[in-house]
Image (spheres, helix red, strand yellow):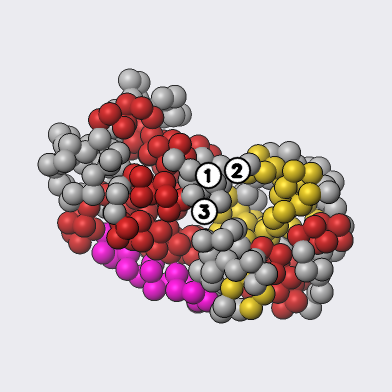
Amino acid sequence: MGESKLGSYIAWAAGALVLCVVLVAGAAGAAVSALLPGGGNLPIPLPLAGPLGALGSMLSVYQQADGVCPGMSWTVLAAIGTVESANGTSTLPGVHSGANPAGAEGPMQMEPATFAAYQYPVPPGGVNPPNPYDPLDAVYAAARDLCANGANTPGGVAHAVFVYNHSDAYVAQVLNLAAGFEHADAQLVSTTTAGGVAVDWAVAQVGIPYIWGGEDPGVGFDCSGLVQAGYHAAGIDLPRTAQAQYDGGPQLPAGVPLLPGDLVFFGTGPQDVTHVGLVIAQGQMVDAPHTGAAVRVEALPDRVGALWGTDEVVGFTRPAS
């Protein structure tokens, strides 16, 4: 057992229960626009007084560590940090010094042997030698631990979280929180363009289950079904499969800034496109990733050839052009 859950629910009750609003906001099909003030321009991030504000200074730490495990969202780290230590604000033993009764240490509550296995390389801004009580060191080590246990593979996040803490209830709590953070982090985009309409519609589906062949709001989507439905809402008809959507173009030349509604395609090459997502903003996309997951907002590799799990970015298109 890599980490200990002992004390986690106490910390949750003491400091993190305020985030129950995230779970409400993350309910399937909830409209993101209802969570955000104003509207009409990109970007309008959720104010820090909202659900993400409860992450405090740890928000930037979680986001900085996002690149450690391509394919895993920083929100998984944020959810674990919330449950384990209320994002470093808990005063329970082991968070800032010493250990909890099960021997876990630091804001991510890692056991010494586990932290030692994943403490290097020292992250930018971390301390050297690494220290489990240092937020950067702790979060980066936790990200490497999760990645080593499959969090970067399709359907692998739940397994990795279970390895992190052997409890089905813990896994459910972490995944629900992560989904809520993803929903709260989604940005309302301009609805004056077809791409903006498509993205705004797709983001409103966050939390809807992935279903292979799915194309039904409130029921389930696969990746290309979500894209097709989003653009249908914007008055543009697209082909049904990711490969056909890629082939339909028009392709974006290298270096062109991405806009809301641009499509990003993944696979092994132009003739083997297996996944598609909608660009929300530079570095963010909304997609229906794989069986066992749900529509979500996650990190976007923004260069053709960049790795995304076991696939690579094949290219980008702009259907609304």
Quarter of the image that includes the C terminus: bottom right
Q: Picture coordinates of residue 276 (x, y %)?
A: 70, 57
| Type of amino acid at the residue the image marks with label 3 | Gly
User: Image height check: is 284 above or below 61?
Assistant: below
User: Image height check: is 32 above or below 281?
Assistant: below
Res 26 seen here: yes
Q: Name the residue under label 1.
A: 152
| Mark pair 1, 2: CA separation | 6 Å
Given residues 216 and 39, the one toward you in this image is: 216
Q: Name the residue under label 2.
A: 309
Q: Name the residue under label 3.
A: 155
Q: Residue furthest top?
A: 129
| Type of amino acid at the residue the image marks with label 2 | Gly
Res 37 seen here: no
Q: In which quarter of the image is residue 109?
A: top left
Q: Picture coordinates of residue 116 (x, y %)?
A: 32, 26
Magenta-colored span: 16-38
Check contact, mark 1 vs mark 2: CB within 8 A. Answer: yes
Relative side of 220 to 317, left or right: left
